[in-house]
Image (tube, helix red, strand yellow):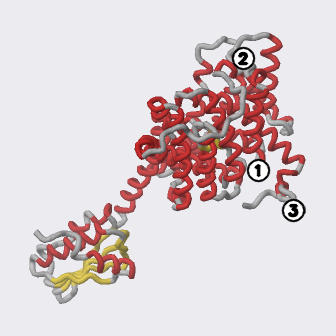
Amino acid sequence: MSLPAALRPKLGRPAWLSPRILRTEALSGLVVALALIPEAVSFSIIAGVDPRIGLFASFTMAVAIAFTGGRPAMISAATGAIALVVAPLAREYGVEYLFAAVVLGGLLQVLLAGAGVARLMRFLPRSVMVGFVNALAILIFTAQLPYLIDVPWQVYPLLAVGLAIMVGLPKLTKAIPAPLVAIIVLTIFTVSAGIAVPTVGDQGELPDSLPILGIPAVPFTFETLTIIAPYAFAMALVGLMESLMTAKLVDDITDTHSDKTRESWGQGIANIVTGFFGGMGGCAMIGQTMINVKSGARTRASTFLAGVFLLILVVALGQIVGLIPMAALVGVMIMVAVGTFDWHSIHPKTLVRMPKSETTVMVATVGVTVATHNLAIGVVVGVLVAMVLFARRVAHLVSVESVLDPDGTTKIYHVTGQLFFASSNDLVFQFDYANDPSEVVIDLSDAHIWDASTVASLDAITTKYEARGTTVTITGMNDDSEKRHATLAGNLTGAH
């Protein structure tokens, strides 16, 4: 991965050891750690477990992925998507089964990485990626609304001041992350003025001890495996999908390339570690990653320090952290949402130029994601919609033209286009069986056979002609098409 000149190592020294870069990484990590606390507590509540389980998961995920991940500066922690997946398991069988599922989910992620799941990212259309980003921004924003409804009126001016600091300070200096300044200023003001507003401490009890390494207390039986396996598999897929999408997003923002395969098995290792330390599992967090990247972080140091700072804040400085007004953290996340949304994608000029199919895919991705609150489902639906629309578009590019020989004994059909299930189904109806002469030639010089559906259509055409005593010759097939046709022709239907 290429780095800007300022980030390149000098004399073999790691880039992050530079005092200027390390300061940026540390400050970014501190802001991320502060933003992680209420999120981890909230996700613990969603999963139906003690807040400490979510906080411990955020610590172990961040620290582990800092060493094993393939995307520097990306933040992994406890997430809402994983919480939704494991909630039924924790509710019905208890946290020990949850920990076992997290370990198994991590093992499955390592196996999927070895199977090359990361290579599937190349099949994600740009419109799905744009929809993913926009849906994420909407979810980040809507997740802040509960903290702004039925709250003391003082919350709103505090939020306005925080937003003003984060918008205005970068225009004066970028030496210190504006979100950190906003958090410190609002905390000092509310404490010194004695203003009673919701705080981080109101979200749940913070831990006062370190996570302990241990083996999940579940029976090591086949029955246990059948209980946890479905949840582990779902968690593995959702976690990988969100993490790889986030990595691709950070690649685009930073103009750098990441190792998606390493990120895949790195997520697996991080979840294995998290399960053994009593965490609820997790994956990449896009909101916190955006905070980190937008604050200037570019190396693994920020990810590692975010995890370390998180543990220090909640264990050693829990009483102080508990005083932070939620209005400050809500402001940080609102700025993240605004900065994440691709405003260009909904500009009237863009919508006019963009093909309707591309806009449809983007809207489908956003709609399903926002409706389900699950980025993975939204992405899957977006890809499926893109595939259907692409198949329809390509199917209409197939044409059949016919020419009758001067002697009137032979008719040549020239087929052009990509022949697959969507385009070849109508191929049977492009021929004049009743009126054609005794010899018919089907020229596929400008066509390509992609699947068995096309071969079956050609078989049906040949059968219809032979029933009328007409001889059919298929010519012009390229090597791949000829091989597929020779293998499947006449073998796709049984005798009746």
Q: Which mark is residue 299?
A: 1
Look at 66% across and 55% down and name the residue there.
Answer: 70
Residue 310 percent location from the top left of the image = 73, 34
Q: Relative to residue 354, is residue 287 depicted above or below?
A: above
Q: State which tag comes first along the sequence, 1 or 3.
A: 3
Q: State which tag comes first along the sequence, 1 or 2.
A: 2
Closer-to-camera residue (233/7): 233
Q: Nearer the viewer, mark 1 or mark 3?
A: 3
Closer-to-camera residue (140/93): 93
Tag 2, which secondary structure? helix
The C terminus, quarter of image: bottom left
Q: At label 1, which amino acid type do we have?
A: Thr
Q: Nearer the viewer, mark 2 or mark 3?
A: 3
Is the residue under label 3 in contact with that under label 1 (CB below 8 Å)? no
Distance from disc 1 to disc 2, alpha carbons, whole Å, reads 36 Å
Residue 163 percent location from the top left of the image = 73, 27
**Residue tagged 2:** 157
**Residue tagged 3:** 12
